[in-house]
Image (tube, rainbow, N blue to C red):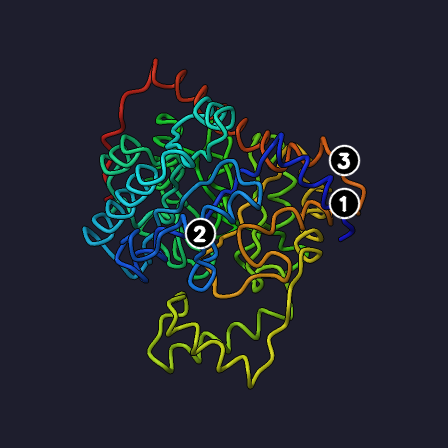
Amino acid sequence: MTPELLDRARAVLRDTPVVDGHNDLPWAMRAQAGYDLDALDLAADQSASLHTDLARLRAGGVGAQFWSVFVRSDYAGDQAVSATLEQIDFVRALTERYPDELRLAFTADDMETARAEGRIASLMGAEGGHSINSSLATLRALHQLGVRYMTLTHNDNVPWADSATDKPVLGGLNAFGEEVVREMNRLGMLVDLSHVSADTMRDALRVTEAPVIFSHSSARGVCDHPRNIPDDVLAALPANGGVAMVTFVPKFILPAAVEWTAAADDNMRAHDFHPLDTTPAAMACHRAFEAVHPRPHATAATVADHLDHMRQLAGIDHLGIGGDFDGTAFTPDGLDDVSGYPNLLAELLHRGWTEADLAKLTWHNAVRVLRDAELVAADLRQTRRPSLMTLK
C-alpha cells in the first residue's frame, strides 16, 4: 500500500474508527494468564503473546470492540454458564483496569459517547447458545450483565439450533430455537448468525423482528467453507437490515488454507492440544508443523475480495468487520494483529471504495444495527412479556 493510501485510510479511522464484531482476548487471557492483567498487562507490548494490546488497538484505529465472552462448545450445562460469567467478569475488570482507554458500553449511544471521549467502547458478545444452557432466564441474565449479542451456536449443535460445522439434526431451528430469537428481539440482544448452519440462518431471518448480525463470517461464494455466508443469505440481508462482518481467519477466506488447516488441526490433536488452543506451547506445535508443511498465506487483498463480493450482494449499508483476533492461530499478512486495519482500508481505497463507503464499513453500519435492535426491543416490551417457554 502506498503512503498516500495509508494516510487516507488513517484519516477515515480518526473520524469513524473500527467497530470490530469479534475479539477473543478474554479467552486468550483465561488460557494464558488466568485473567491476570498483571501477568499480561495490556498497557505494555504483548505482541509476543497476543494479537491485542492498547497501543495496537490505537494504531489500528479501533473505536469499539465486541469482546467475545466465548467458552468452548465442549463446555456443557452449568459449566458453560459459569465459564461465561467468568468471561463477563474479566471484561468488566478489563475496562476498570484501563478507564482512560476503555469504556464499558451497552447501547449505541454509549458507543457514540465513547467515540466523543476518545475511548474505545467495550461491548460483549456471547459466542454459542450453549452459554445459556437452554434457559431463557439465563439469556435474560446475560443481557442484564451487558451481553449485547449471542451467536446461536459455536462449532457444535445446541439442542435447539444446528451449527455450520456439526452434523445437521434439526434442519435449522426448532420451536425453542425460534423462541430464543424472539426473546433476543424483545431484549434488544443482537441475533448473531456466525457459526450456524445455512438453514439456521434462513430460519432466524424468517423469525426475527430485528436486524441480525454475522459477527465474524465471510462469503461462501469466494471461499466455500460452511462457516461462511451463502449468497442467497447475503442477498436477503438488506430486507432484514442486518450487518455481515467479514472475518480474517485464513481457513475461512482462502480456499488453499482450508485443507492445510484441517491437517494442522489433526496434528494439534495428535499432540494433545485442542485445535483452538493459542497458548505459547500450542503455537510452538503449530510452528513445527508449518516448518515441514508450508502454510498458504492470506493477505488484506484476500479479505477485500470477500468484501467486494459481499457488497455486490448485500450492499454497502450491510457490511462490517469482525477480525477474530486472539481467536485464531494464524492471520493474513498485513492483518497480523489489531493494528492492521489501515492496511485493509488502504486496499479498499485502491479498489475504488470511497471514504464514505469506508465510514459505513467501519462505524456507521454497526452502530445503526445495534440502535435498530434497541428500537425494536422498546416496542416489543410494550406488548410482550418475558417468555416462560422451556425446551421440551
The numbered mark, 2 or 3, whose residue comes first in the sequence reads 2
Q: CA distance from mark 2 to mark 1?
A: 46 Å
Q: Is residue 165 above or below residue 171?
A: below
Give amino acid for label 3. Answer: Thr
The numbered mark, 1 or 3, whose residue comes first in the sequence reads 1
Give amino acid for label 1. Answer: Leu
Toward the viewer: 45 or 328?
Answer: 45
Toward the viewer: 249 or 77?
Answer: 249
Q: Quadrant of the C terminus?
A: top left
Outermost residue toward the left in this view: 78
For disc 2, the marked residue is 171
Q: Which mark is residue 5?
A: 1
Q: Secondary structure at mark 1?
A: helix
Give the side of residue 70 with respect to residue 138, left or right.
right
Q: Secondary structure at mark 3?
A: loop
For marks 1 and 3, give the one nearer the viewer: 1
Question: Mark 1 packing: few (<14 Cα in 10 Å), some, or many (20+)?
Answer: some
Residue drawn at (57%, 30%) of the image: 241
Q: CA distance from mark 1 to mark 3?
A: 11 Å
